[in-house]
Image: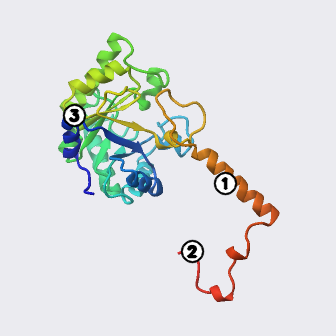
Amino acid sequence: MDEINVLQFAEYKRERRKITAITAYDAPFAKIMEEAGIDLVLVGDSVGMAVHGRPDTLSVTMEEMILHGRSVASAVTRPFVAVDMPYMTFQASKELAAQNAVRLVKETGAKAVKVEGGVKVASAIRAIVEAGVPVIGHAGLLPQSVHEIGGYKAQGTTAQSARVVMEDALAAEEAGAFMVVLEAIPAELGRSITGALGIPAIGIGAGPHCDGQILVMHDMLGLSTGRLPRFVKTYANLREQAVAAARKYADEVRSGAFPTDEHSYHAKNEGEGRK
């Protein structure tokens, strides 16, 4: 199948065809998502929590996003790959935002970047787009503002905060974003914003009326530990299967059941090995 591009996402919205999106942080899982038919793979700064075990996303660096972004983008063909811009790589100035966005797509091979916020970062979004880099906006719960908002809490639950989320989403579109992620907001607000936008709205805890959905891959596959957000649906329990497999391996090593002759080299096997 052909590579997905920005224009196709706009067409999907017009056709009311739901967009499927997921996060991924390395080549093996990116290939799995491609085989599954996922439309958009986001290399999220959630890598800091999902892969590196940190309490939030704030310490994730450009170098880390480039490393993970390159791994994902080089592994797939059809899915549209976007990379999160880390904390404080776009907030300080529009010039810095454009410079870092160009670096991300140039050094990873991704096709777009994602920027958290709307009204406050509209000038940064506009500068990035003018530099030739497609932008995905992000409204609602903004993980990079976790300390400012007092934790990972649903947003838009009051009339005033709902207006803020709506204004952020509209500001991102006005600044040139081709898509907006809506995170942790009431379903009714998700429907209103999706209808108000001329660009696709991708929900993560924003109800069923968005133009598409995204989840953190580790949450969806049952690889995460601890309490999961309300909006997560777990479709597998790979962590449990991995623990069972590793335990069986350890038991067989200790008992001498592994390796057997089948897994051992002999003179006739000269030249064989893991390529």
Give the vertical position of 182 relative to 107 (above or below): above
Q: Residue furthest right?
A: 255
Is 155 positioned to the left or the right of 229 in the image? Answer: left
Up the image or down, 214 lies above or below 189; here it is below
N-terminal of the pair, mark 2 or mark 1, is 1
- Helix, strand or loop at label 1? It is helix
Can you say which quadrant of the picture contains the N terminus?
bottom left
What sort of colour scheme is used for the picture? rainbow
**Residue at 43 percent of width and 31 percent of height:** 143
Callouts 2 and 1 close, C-beta under 8 Å: no
Name the side, left or right, on which 257 lies relative to 268: right
Between disc 2 and disc 1, the foreground one is 1
Q: Which residue is mark 1?
A: 245
Q: CA distance from mark 2 to mark 1?
A: 21 Å
Locate residue 192: give its quadrant. top left
Is residue 99 among what the camera can see?
A: yes
Compared with 263, 214 (above or below) is above
Locate residue 264, reporting x and y percent.
Answer: 70, 77
Nearer the N terminus, badge 2 or badge 3? 3
Q: For the residues marked 2 and 3, what is the alpha-carbon distance in whole angstroms?
A: 47 Å
Residue type at tag 3: Ile
- Left or right side of 228 for 39: left
User: Which callout, 3 or 1, points to the residue nearer the camera?
Assistant: 1
Q: Return the disc, 3 or 1, that comes first in the chain's sequence.
A: 3
Residue 119 seen by the camera: no
Residue highlighted by disc 3: 199
Q: Give the labeled residue for mark 2.
A: 274
Under tag 3, what secondary structure? loop
